[in-house]
Image: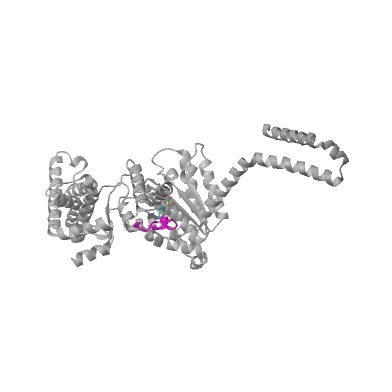
Amino acid sequence: MIKKLLVSLLIISLFLLIGSFLNLEYLYTHSTPIIKTSLIIFIICISFLIKKINQKPELMLVNSLRQEEKKEENNQKKVYFKDVAGLDEVKEDLQEITDFLKFPEKYSKMGAKIPKGVMFYGPPGTGKTLMASAISGETNANFMYASGSEFVEKYVGVGASRIRSLFEKAKKQAPCVIFIDEMDAIGVSRSSDNNSERDQTLNQLLVELDGFNSYENIIVIGATNRIELLDEALLRPGRFDRHIYVGNPNVRAREDILRVHTRNKPLSKSVNIKEIARKTHGMSGAQLANIVNEAAIFAVRDNRSTIGNEEFNKAIERVVAGLKTKNAVISEKEKRIVAYHEAGHALVGRILNNELIEKISIVPHGQSLGFVLNSSSEDRFLMTKQELHQKIQTLLAGRAAEEIIFNEISTGAQNDLVKSTEIAQQMVCEYGMSSLGNRTFNGKFLSGYESYINKEVNLIIENSYKDSKSILLKNLNYLKLIAERLLSEETISGRELEKILKVS
Ligand code: ATP
């Protein structure tokens, strides 16, 4: 208001000033109608111009914000599978869903129903949001992003009504991909605490998931870092029934991600992406994208025309140093221990043939620094005593390998020890598989037997450990080959493991 008044005063004073200089009154009374009109237009234009200049900063800001929004929308739409590097298995898993969104008639003709919901889970920054957005890009479907925390409100019913309107909007915009990030904010198990607002929101989400049918051409994708916290009702068939793990990338995937992010950047010829991928062990896609960006910023700061190795090294250092407290990248020494530990598990498991190995990895995820992924060829309902012994041998093989190679043991076997103690204890107390006889030990039949049970459990574990160690010692060359391959490749598939065992 004050601004407007000032502008008006300015115009009037300007007008008077010009008037007194030019003897405007005389001019006005004695001039032709054309001159009079142009004078009026001139004054209107001047006042309009002054007004516009006065408003410019505001308008510019609003306009630029609008442009940013639009840019963001367009950017979101423009993500395709080619922009998501290194998640080929996930893309394969999502093949039917993308096909369904592209050709819904094909499926409705057959009466086939496609999963309504997919749950991405895994560590942060691994590309879950990016992948969801790429599905919409590939299928030309609308993308609706929501974060679980948006639905968390103090007042009962608000979150639920937001869920309702999200799905209403999606139905109007079908084909549509609804992506709900941070699912744990609304989807935690209802038994964990008493929160009626969150329960209502979750119930509403379940109602909405049940409410639309599979022909409606809407896919709901959820994402969480902690799937184990989610309510079972959310994950059951007909809701988020596809659970897809999106993990930290291995060395090859890191290379692909780095290539995607350096695609449109001027790199110096000496930059070796493979080498950068090797150096960034344990980092997520988001961290890699950050490294490329930091390197570009360093190059601008140093007035360089291209991004070189020096910039990348500085960027890695910055990201690693920044991460140390939160998400420490493991040292070379630890990496070696993890490699031998996992190689030990895989080798003993494979030799005893009690497991079908799908993948061995030393890419950290969650709390674990590596893993051996097994798959059973058949469902098992019974286990023999020998098989249980072999299971314990495989569990203890990680520690045995560490002891053989480094003559030292680490904390890395903690989880294995928990599991093997549990099995040994079940063998003694529940399955009657010890020298204490064909009987169980629990409840009132336990007291007085504790020390005997402990002795038996120890015996099973010690014998299994010795057996495990002797298997590894007999196959030391294989152990080394697997571990060394892990150190260079970080992930080995079951097929590659077979090749290593055959060739040598
Ligand atoms: P959060 O669990 O924290 O929500 P997220 O798994 O959803 O993380 P995104 O938001 O998808 O991670 O990834 C963040 C950024 O990291 C992306 O915008 C992209 O720049 C980069 N990024 C992550 N993974 C990949 C990948 N596989 N390929 C290319 N870029 C990636």
Q: Which residues are magenta?
A: 259-272
* Colour treatment of the image: one colour
Q: Residue 252 lies in magenta, yes or no?
A: no
Q: For the view shown, which residue lies furthest in the top direction?
A: 2
Query: Camera-side residue: 449 or 358?
Result: 358
Q: Is residue 362 left or right of residue 5?
A: left
- Residue 256, compared with residue 299, is above or below; it is below
- Most distant residue in the front direction: 21
Q: Quadrant of the N terminus?
A: top right
Q: Is residue 97 left or right of residue 13?
A: left
Q: Position of residue 65 (x, y in %)?
A: 56, 45
* Coordinates of residue 421 in the picture (x, y in percent): 20, 46
User: For the stretch drawn in magenta, what is the main secondary structure?
Assistant: loop
**Which quarter shows the C terminus?**
bottom left
User: Is residue 381 visible to us here?
Assistant: no
Residue 34, x across and y down, in percent: 84, 47
For the image shown, how many numbered marks are present on the structure? Answer: 0
> Front-most of 254 and 297?
297
Left or right of 44, for residue 442: left
Q: Nearer the viewer, residue 335 or 33?
A: 33
* Residue 127 in the image: above or below residue 105: above
Residue 261 in magenta?
yes
Instruction: Write the residue at 48% across / 39% down.
Output: 197
Is 127 or 344 nearer to us in this picture? 127
Residue 114 picture location, percent across and down:
46, 61
User: Left or right of 382: which side holds 314?
Assistant: right
- Let me know if residue 332 appears in the view: yes
418 w.r.t. 491: above or below: above
